[in-house]
């Protein structure tokens, strides 16, 4: 943990001013607020995922796969917010556990397609009751109306920022 140096008088004020960046307080930055909220939510889900032998990233992939018949690997990386190398490793693990199935796309043999397996669907069904119970607890604690408003506001924020040009021209970072 960082410690403040003990100073007195105007020297302390000058040192404090010198350390401050010309921007909003770190704790009030939007990225930090979103990360703290994400952590508070994920703290509720992690024990269940661990109980079922899943990481957060594996769960995201399986959940994304339940919404589609099959998906191209690059599109899966985008929707699950994972970097390509991380996704490749996670897919290998999920395939070894027979939770997913991989094949090449018929139209383009260079493209890989992924789908959830029957065993993967059974795992989803095993985790679902606990997951839904956690959602119910969050909804009771935070409020159904406030949760719906929060999800709408986050969707609106995402939409409003999606058209902005990224200054360095890079892609947004994904969670590994």
Image: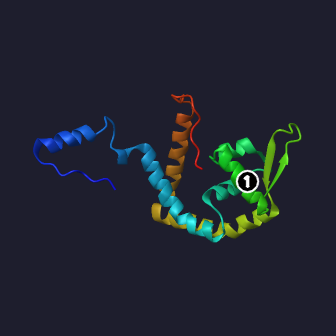
Q: Residue at x 50, y 45 (%)?
A: 153
Q: Residue at x 45, y 54 (%)?
A: 36
User: Going by the picture, which residue comes out furthest to the right?
Assistant: 106
Residue 116: x %, y % from top left = 78, 57
Vertical comparison of 96 with 48: above or below: above
Q: In the displayed structure, does residue 157 sit left or right of residue 106?
A: left
Residue 7: x %, y % from top left = 15, 49
Residue 8: x %, y % from top left = 12, 48
Give the number of callouts. 1
Q: Quadrant of residue 14?
A: top left
Residue 100 visible in rendering: yes
Q: In the displayed structure, does residue 54 sit left or right of residue 45?
A: right
Q: Residue at x 67, y 66 (%)?
A: 128
Residue 79: x %, y % from top left = 66, 45
**Which quadrant is the N terminus positioned in?**
bottom left
Colour pattern: rainbow
Q: Residue at x 54, y 40 (%)?
A: 158
Vertical comparison of 105 with 101: above or below: above
Q: In the displayed structure, does residue 43 sit left or right of residue 123?
A: left
Q: Residues within 10 Å of mark 1 (few under 14, many from 20)?
A: many
As helix, strand or loop, the secondary structure at mark 1 comes to helix
Residue under label 1: 91
Residue 99 visible in rendering: no
Vertical comparison of 18 with 150: above or below: above
């Amino acid at each position: 943990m960082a410690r403040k140096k003990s100073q007195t008088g105007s020297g302390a004020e000058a040192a404090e001013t010198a350390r401050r960046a010309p921007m909003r307080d770190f704790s009030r930055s939007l990225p930090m607020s979103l990360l703290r909220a994400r952590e508070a939510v994920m703290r509720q889900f992690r024990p269940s995922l661990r109980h079922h032998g899943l990481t957060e990233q594996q769960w995201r992939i399986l959940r994304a796969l339940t919404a589609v018949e099959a998906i191209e690997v690059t599109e899966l990386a985008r929707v699950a917010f994972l970097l390509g190398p991380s996704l490749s490793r996670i897919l290998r693990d999920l395939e070894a556990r027979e939770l997913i199935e991989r094949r090449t796309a018929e139209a383009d043999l260079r493209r890989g397609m992924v789908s959830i397996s029957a065993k993967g669907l059974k795992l989803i069904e095993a985790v679902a009751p606990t997951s839904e119970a956690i959602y119910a607890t969050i909804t009771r604690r935070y409020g159904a109306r406030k949760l719906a408003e929060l999800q709408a506001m986050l969707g609106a924020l995402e939409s409003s920022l999606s058209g902005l040009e990224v200054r360095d021209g890079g892609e947004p970072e994904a969670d590994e």
